Image (spheres, rainbow, N blue to C red):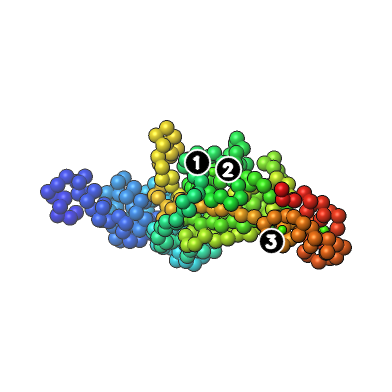
Amino acid sequence: MTGCCAAVSLLLCASTTMAQQCPGVGDCRKPHAEPGCVMPECCTLVCEANPLCCDFSWDQACADLALKLCEGINCPAEGECGASHASPGCDQFPCCDFICAIDGWCCSVTWDEACANEAARMCGVSACTIAIPSDAIAELEPCYEHFNDGCSKAPFATRAVLFGNAYAGKFATDAPRDTDWMSLGGGNAGDEVRVQLASEFPWEFQIVKGSCEGPLEVPILAHGGPCGDAVTLVFTVPTGEWYAVLTGGVETRTFREAFTCDEVDPLAPPPKEPPEPSPYGLRYWLRFTHHLAADLDGDGRVDAADLSILLNAWGSNGRLGDLDGNGWVDAADLTALLNAWSL
Ligand SMILES: [Ca+2]
Ligand SMILES: [Ca+2]
Ligand SMILES: [Ca+2]
Ligand SMILES: [Ca+2]
């Protein structure tokens, strides 16, 4: 026992040495000569139960205690964070802890290629703040509420958006995670849509088609961010019922944890103690613009000039004028053009 313990109570001494020894060195699940072990939370739990593990050495009794008390605490563990390995967890505590918070697979099953890629991309990033356009319309969906989560959360609801306007929103995880579903007013199948998008977190953008009863198809799936200038995505309006959906995620996983709400509503507090704040911000903005498929000369209107182009291409297999994409310019295309006629 160190000298301090002669003068102060054993409890105070134990808590002092615990603070000094956690985290220590050595695997918490295996005995080793040094006091303490490498997983901070597990080390603290074990030493609270048995201060000798932090005073003298991490013996078999301490290792046994760790196996009993530290289930689910897996960081740090053996193996480089940036390389895949069979065992769960990796050797850098903050990185391992963050990746495991958003991707439980990495700490419960195996640190696979996806975990290594997520670590390479997300560990050590610093938060950024994006500039939201001053004319952007606010989402009015508090964190932990689900006002526009489409088929993800009953009752079905979406955010109604119009071409040309900018819309701001926030993404925070909870159970279930936040998904922002948008219904676009206007636009016909075949029209080209551009989406300008910037966010403070890695985003996942989808075009979802069909009804909640199924089948739901995802003809467009894109990922990007965080930070930097707005990117522009281009897609074609599908036929039938469809929605644009924005949420957080990377190619390998969608985010379900670690994006903590930054607003606290006393009437709707978080359902559980939130995890450490995400290294990312929660805000995004986007703007949809569109180009009418039938606007063949691209002047923003469907009128006689476009009709003339279509009639000149009549019967040909040229792409210009083939609005329904069946390979020929014919009566079906003429009907589509007349239906899109600008008033
Ligand atoms: Ca939202
Ligand atoms: Ca939402
Ligand atoms: Ca035109
Ligand atoms: Ca056609």
Which type of secondary structure does the marked residue at label 1 adopt? loop
Residue 328 relative to residue 41: left or right: right
Which of 3/168 is in front? 168
Which residue is at 59% across, 46% downward?
A: 161
Residue 45 lies, in percent from the top left, at 34, 47
Q: Position of residue 328 (x, y in %)?
A: 84, 61
The answer as to whether callout 1 falls within 8 Å of ligand 1 is yes
- Which quadrant holds residue 253? bottom right
- Dot 2 beta carbon under 8 Å from ligand 2: yes
Residue 141 tag number = 1
Asked if 184 appears above or below 312 in the picture, the reply is above
Q: Amino acid at mark 2?
A: Arg
Residue under the point 83% across and 61% down: 311
Callouts 1 and 2 close, C-beta under 8 Å: yes
Identify the secondary structure beneath mark 2: strand
Number of the front mark, 2 or 3: 3
Q: Does residue 101 appear anywhere in the picture?
A: no
Image point (86%, 58%), residue name: 330
The answer to whether one can see residue 239 in this image is yes
Q: Is the residue 260 above or below the residue 29 in the image?
A: above
- Of the residues shown, which amino acid type is indicated by label 3? Gly
Tags 1 and 3 in contact by the CB under 8 Å rule?
no
- The x, y position of residue 336, in whole percent, is 79, 52
Q: Residues within 10 Å of mark 2 (few under 14, many from 20)?
A: many
Question: Circle 3 sits on which residue?
Answer: 298
| Residue furthest to the right | 315
- In percent of width and height, residue 170 lies at 48, 47
Disc 3 secondary structure class: loop
Pointer 1 or 3: first along the chain: 1
The disc label shown at residue 159, or none: 2
Which of the 4 quarters of the picture holds residue 40? Answer: bottom left
